[in-house]
């Protein structure tokens, strides 16, 4: 019986993970659930899943939480350190890191420190601290398994050959809601339009990142460190149907792809059951119906955020932490109607260009650059 800690259980990744766990009750169980502030949803999950521990990361709301809403068998804790302590628990076998943004770095770092199997959907972990995280995992014996559908697809496709046989990996992108819009149309995008993703049902931050294609930029950077490949061996293709989740091209010309209907429960389950496969709850391909799959190159001029991803993946150092922090603030300001849609990548470019680059930063410096970039992004005004 695998014992699972789900960091960010009330988010889209967390709720999909609990769906998988409910269908795998003879093989695994959730022993710890965490949320940032959504304590009522966490309490409902605790009644359904009966974890041993529940954590509310934002300790400032402790006085507002009705403790009687939680099962008496579930220990309720507060604070970021409690999240990290859950990730380090000796009786936890797998840590699912589903916390969005740089906030997920601490819990993932704690899990890696403890040598856990870490199923991570938090791409920012490797965007901010990729080389440090991968080196740390090698030192502690931790196993990092990607939950992002694109990186899971690459991970699965890489089993078809040796690393020196890989020509390139190709990340697919839906293109978001504006893939066919002109630059003039994109200049006038509203918040409601940006939040209407045509394929995936995700939280607001990730949905906006998909609309700007910043999510693919972050995935390029993540892939650079996770698969230890130079940026020249990473490519992106627009695939609106989101059936092919990514591909690996080998030197002989063979292209191996992983296909499935868009359903995050599949890559989550693969990470939880790896190296085995078991029947699951995710939707299946139905080849009795017609499928039309299309692919096209991305337009870097209409989606300048994507260009930033290739640049930062090639440069490394402090640039990933700065890009990620600037983007998180830019998205928040867009959702608050403080920025226009095209200003999101402009803000990120400006903060990247202004920062003092360091090629081999420590974790402390990365966290310092994260704070600096957020402050600058809050002040930014084009």
Image (spheres, rainbow, N blue to C red):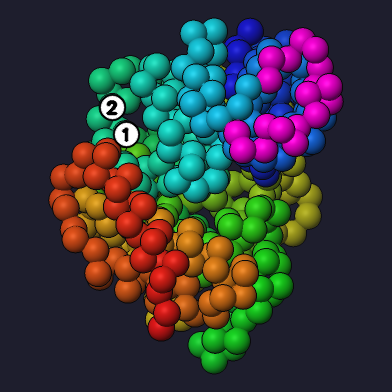
In depth, the one of 148 and 169 nearer the eye is 148
Q: Is residue 276 visible?
A: yes
Q: Is residue 72 magenta?
A: yes
Rendered residue at 45%/46% (across/down): 102
Rendered residue at 48%/42% (across/down): 103
State which region is magenta: 59-76
The residue beneath circle 2 is 136
Is residue 363 found left or right of 38 in the rendered image? left
Quadrant housing the N terminus: top right
Q: Is residue 313 visible?
A: no
Residue 76: % across, % down: 68, 20
Residue 118: % across, % down: 47, 26
Compared to residue 86, the image places residue 232 above or below, namely below
The residue beneath circle 1 is 133
Disc 1, SS: helix
Q: Residue furthest bottom?
A: 184
Q: Residues within 10 Å of mark 1 (few under 14, many from 20)?
A: many
Q: Is residue 257 magenta?
A: no
In depth, the one of 76 and 140 nearer the eye is 76
Compared to residue 4, the image places residue 347 above or below, namely below
Residue 268: % across, % down: 60, 33
Rendered residue at 41%/71% (across/down): 379
Quadrant housing the C terminus: bottom left
Asked if the residues shown at circle 1 and circle 2 are in contact, with their CB atoms under 8 angstroms apart, the answer is yes
Residue 91: % across, % down: 54, 8
Q: Residues within 10 Å of mark 2 (few under 14, many from 20)?
A: some
């Amino acid at each position: 019986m695998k014992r699972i800690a789900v960091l960010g259980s009330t988010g889209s990744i967390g709720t999909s993970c609990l769906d998988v766990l409910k269908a795998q009750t003879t093989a695994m169980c959730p022993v710890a659930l965490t949320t940032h502030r959504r304590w009522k949803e966490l309490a409902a999950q605790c009644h359904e899943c009966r974890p041993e521990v529940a954590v509310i990361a934002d300790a400032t709301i402790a006085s507002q939480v009705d403790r009687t809403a939680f099962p008496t068998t579930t220990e309720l804790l507060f604070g970021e350190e409690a999240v990290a302590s859950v990730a380090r628990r000796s009786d936890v076998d797998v840590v699912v890191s589903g916390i969005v943004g740089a906030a997920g770095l601490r819990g993932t770092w704690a899990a890696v420190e403890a040598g856990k199997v870490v199923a991570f959907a938090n791409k920012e972990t490797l965007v901010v601290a990729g080389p440090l995280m991968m080196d740390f995992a090698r030192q502690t014996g931790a196993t990092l398994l990607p939950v992002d559908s694109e990186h899971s697809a690459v991970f699965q496709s890489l089993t078809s050959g040796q690393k020196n046989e890989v020509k390139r990996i190709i990340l697919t992108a839906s293109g978001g809601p504006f893939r066919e819009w002109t630059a003039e149309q994109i200049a006038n995008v509203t918040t409601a339009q940006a939040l209407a993703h045509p394929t995936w049902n995700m939280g607001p931050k990730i949905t906006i990142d998909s609309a700007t294609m910043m999510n693919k930029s972050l995935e390029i950077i993540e892939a650079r460190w996770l698969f230890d490949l130079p940026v020249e061996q990473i490519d992106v293709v627009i695939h609106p149907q989101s059936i092919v989740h990514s591909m690996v091209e080998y030197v002989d010309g063979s292209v191996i792809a992983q296909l499935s209907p868009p359903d995050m429960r599949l890559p989550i389950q693969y990470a939880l059951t790896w190296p085995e496969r078991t029947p699951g709850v995710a939707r299946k391909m139905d080849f009795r119906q017609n499928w039309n799959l299309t692919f096209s190159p991305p337009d870097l001029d209409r989606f300048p955020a994507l260009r930033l991803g290739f640049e930062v993946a090639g440069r490394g150092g402090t640039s990933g932490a700065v890009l990620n922090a600037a983007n998180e603030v830019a998205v928040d300001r867009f959702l608050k109607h403080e920025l226009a849609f095209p200003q999101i990548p402009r803000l990120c470019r400006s903060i990247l260009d202004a920062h003092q680059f360091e090629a081999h930063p420590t974790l402390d410096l990365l966290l310092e650059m994260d704070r600096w970039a957020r402050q600058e992004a809050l002040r930014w005004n084009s």
